[in-house]
């Protein structure tokens, strides 16, 4: 499974941003997908949002009500939209996938940087 993110960049606080992740390969092994982020070197990685094969979604408290995760099944593209961005949303965002939503993320994208300026 190959995952390629896009859509990161520098934005102002209060704006919205949509990240995309194109999945290819044996996507049967990637039926649970998610977005994770690492704020800065040495900081703990956070699971921002996940979506299971059945469509069940989960969001971190830090982005709940501001984020939407969605999956275009026809084109195998995962999206994450975060509204009302805050400086604390600044991080490297990674698309990840696994078979069962166990938290054992097996497949990773290269990451895309999001920087929010206040």
Image (cartoon, rainbow, N blue to C red):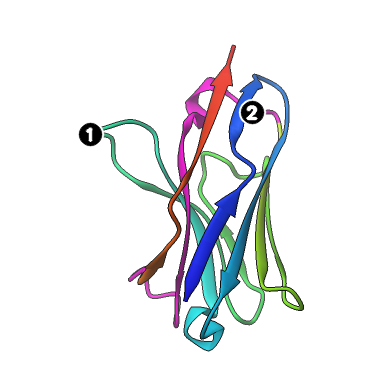
Which residue is the site of mark 2? 85
Name the quadrant containing residue 66. Answer: top right
Residue under circle 1? Answer: 42
In the orientation shown, which residue stands out farthest toward the left? 42
Task: Give the magenta part as a residue range.
Answer: 84-105
How far across and down, in percent of the image, does residue 90 sit? 49, 29
Residue drawn 67% across the image and 56% down it = 79
Dot 1 alpha-carbon crowd within 10 angstroms: few under 14, some 14 to 19, many 20 or more: few
Spatial separation of the CA atoms under disc 1 and disc 2: 22 Å
Q: Residue furthest top?
A: 118
**Drawn side of residue 92 relative to residue 56, left or right:** left
Position of residue 20 measured from the top left corner of the image (x, y, whole percent): 65, 54
33 w.r.t. 53: above or below: above
Figure check: 74 above or below 45: below
Q: Is residue 95 magenta?
A: yes
Residue placed most toward the observer, 58 or 14:
14
């Amino acid at each position: 499974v190959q995952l390629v993110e896009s859509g990161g960049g520098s934005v102002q606080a209060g704006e919205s941003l949509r990240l995309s992740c194109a999945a290819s390969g044996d996507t049967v092994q990637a039926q649970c997908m998610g977005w994770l982020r690492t704020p800065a070197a040495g900081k703990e990685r956070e699971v921002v949002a996940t979506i299971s094969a059945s469509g069940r979604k989960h969001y971190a408290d830090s982005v709940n009500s501001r984020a939407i995760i969605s999956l275009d099944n026809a084109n195998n593209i995962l999206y994450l939209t975060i509204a009302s961005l805050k400086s604390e949303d600044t991080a490297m965002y990674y698309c990840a996938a696994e078979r069962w939503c166990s938290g054992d993320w097996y497949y990773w994208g290269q990451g895309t940087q999001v920087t929010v300026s206040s």
